[in-house]
Each structure stands twice: as structure tokens, then as C-alpha cells.
Image (cartoon, rainbow, N blue to C red):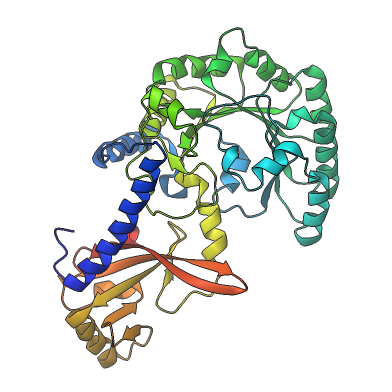
Amino acid sequence: MASAKNQQLRKEAIEYLQIQEDFYGQVRRLGFEFAPKSDPVQPKEQMERLKRGGAIFLNGGRSIHVGRLSPACRACEKGIGSRTFFISFQCNRDCYFCFNHTMKDYGYYLQHERDAKEDLYALAKKTPELQFVGLSGGEPLLHPEKVIDFFQTARTLFPEAYMRLYTNGDFVDSSILRALSKAGLNEIRFSIKMEDFYEGKTVYDSLVSANEHQLVAMVEMPIEPGTEGVMQGILRNLNQIGIFGINLLEMLCSLVHPGAYKERGYLIKNPPWSVLYDYWYPGTLPIAGSEAACLNLLEYALEEGFKLGVHYCSGENKHTAQLFRQNAGGPIPKTHTFSENSYFLVSAKAYGKDALEVLRVFQRSGFQKFRFDPASRILEFPVGMVPTLPNPDMQIGIATSTLERSNGEVLLRELRLDLTTPRIFDPKRDV
């Protein structure tokens, strides 16, 4: 804001900052606190070390892995040909960080079951080429017979699809693993927490048994800040027993159970997202320090040379499939560009006398893909034209927007405003 000399641009940017502060205030009133603003330099340096070490960066660095990666995780970026189903939200556990509480119709499906098999039949009529099928919950194996029936049906309807099951592992035994393998399941993903690896738990036995039944055995868990020491031991053990891999999830908070986060000293990441928005994924907001712990564990995996696949799945990685569905192939205005990096729509905006100057430049050149509002004196145009402007220090706003569908209409919603000039504009960063 200190460098925004164009007062009209500055005024519009202040409105977005006010929206952010209002949001922060709402979160604080729920009993949560934000961490101090994060230093962007440190994670960038760590990212560079990971690249030099051979880590694979996907989805603009939102997904990073060392070694093997589940094909279902690769499909997560855009969500094309991938669907996840559930039978109910019933679960035998009550994890404080679970965000099922924020799912649509949570209360209903806590008491009732959904006909997931019927959902398969309905989807097969519309999307016969489904490539990835998942079943989650709640805890699906509270309904073992329906789980087996689900995967048998899915294998019949989508014979080439990659099938995965999410479970906390409490009801996994040799008989259920045998039945799942026979039903056509490819991958069993144990969604668990650190406590499952000690206090007499048998999760390691279940993972070994999954291997013996020729299932791709995966562990998936949110990584709590400051737990790298314990997690290093878990990674060593998982590597030793020979499972396929582990997903290190950036820990997300669903804005329930504030006391549980407060007693652990956990704060909300600041800023939580690169673009504040009402994302579909119910995790809501990331916990500060979780990403750093995940990146540290990736570096540890590289140093140890594990055969175990270790994958960092950031909170931002959960959102891109939604944005791709909303914006790719949509009715994109002539002034906007679909970002292949963020999957948002971006545009450039000139203000006041600068807008009039840009307007004259475009009129002289015959360029017509712009929108000028003479009342507000704002000119909006494609970001690719920013480097062509003759004044290298003209302040230009970079607007981030998304398409939204409501009552049969497609609306364009602007979400964020950033500052650039023709001199500093970088298409890798600004588009």
C-alpha cells in the first residue's frame, strides 16, 4: 500500500484490505487467533533446496513429492475424471481437527445413510469414462457390507478406474482386506494421527496386512506444527515395513473446537490463502507452522533416501480442482485471462488519468479488447498488454476473479487486487 501512488487504485485496494480485516475479525470472534505475518523468504529458500535435491513439484508447488505418488493424488489438481463418495458421516472417533462438521447436511448424514451405490449408477449415465473412484466418510468400514458392494459395483461400471478407500483403520482386518481386494479395490488410505502409531495401536500390522493382500497401502495424516522429531521415526518405520507412501497434509482448521487449538498453542496461518475465497473444501483455514513441518520432513526423506513415497499436500492444493471447474472453458470476458497457474481469471486495470492514457494507446493501435467506464474512469484489459504500455512506471492493478454460477446465470466476481507496472510485470508471477 505504501507504494500505491495512484489514489484511485489505492482506494480500491483498501476496500479489499477491509474485507480481509473483517474476515479476520470474524475468525477471532470464533475464538481463533492468527499468527504474525509469515516471512515469504524462508519457505522459498527451502523450496529451492528441495528442487535441488530432486523433489518433484506439481500444481505450481502446491503439491511436492519425493519418490512415489498415488495416481489419485496426481488427478486431484484438476479433478477431471475423479469423484469421491460417502455412505455416511458416522465415525467411531471424534478427532478435534476433523472438518466433517462443516460438511453440507452433516447432521442428517450423521443419522442417515446415503445410497452411494445409486450415486455410482447415476454418475455412470453422465460420466462413463470415470478414471478415479474414492469412498470416504465418516468411517466407511462401519458399513463393511455396503463398502464391499460399492466397490464391486464401481468395478463393474468403471472397469478401468483406480479405486481407493479412506479409513481410520480401526475395523481393518485380514478378512475385510481380502474382500476389498477381491471387490477390485486398488488403494487403501489410512487417514490417521500420530497417536495411532503408539499406545498399543496396531496400525503397522494393518499396513503390513494390506501389502500382503496386494493393495496399495497409504498413510494420510495432518502434520501438527513442531512434530518433526516424532514424524521422522514414523517415516522410518513406514519405510521399513514397505508400504507405498504417505501424504503429509497441511493441517487445516474447520473453525470448530477453538479450545483444542488454543491449548496446543496453534494459530491460523497469516495470510491463510493467497486469495481469500469461499472454497468448497471444508478444511477452511491452515494452521501456522504445519507447512514448515511438512517441508522439513520432505528434506528428511531426501536425506535418508527412502523408498517410501513422501508427498506434501498443501491446503492450496485442495482448491485448484474447484477453480478449474469454475473457470476453465467458461464464458471468459475478453478483458480476462485464464491463469494456467492459479486457475483464477486475471485482468489488468488502469485508473483515472492513467486509464485515459492507456485508452489513447489502444485507440491508436486499434486494440479493442478492453472495457472502459467513463464514469469511474477505470479501464480493464488483458494482463498480456501490460508490458506493451509506453510508461514503464505506470501503476496498474492486477485483478483476480472467478466465475460463479447462480440461478442459471454466470457471474464474474472480483476477489483481489495487486499492484504492478510495465517495468516489473512478470507473467510467471502475475498471471
**Residue nearer the viewer, 276 or 82:** 276
The spot of residue 56 in percent (x, y) is 45, 39
The spot of residue 102 in percent (x, y) is 57, 43
Is the residue 399 above or below the residue 378 in the image? above
Is the residue 367 above or below the residue 193 in the image? below
The spot of residue 98 in percent (x, y) is 56, 33
Quadrant of the frame with the C terminus: bottom left
User: Residue at image x 42%, y 65%?
Assistant: 401
User: Residue at image x 56%, y 26%?
Assistant: 95
Quadrant of the frame with the N terminus: bottom left
| Residue 90 shows up from this direction | yes
Residue farthest toward the front in the current orientation of the protein: 29
User: Residue at image x 55%, y 51%?
Assistant: 280
In the image, taking residue 289 as reference, residue 364 lies left or right, namely left
**Residue nearer the viewer, 140 or 124:** 140
Is the residue 195 above or below the residue 258 in the image? above
Name the quadrant containing residue 422: bottom left
**Residue nearer the viewer, 321 or 25:** 25
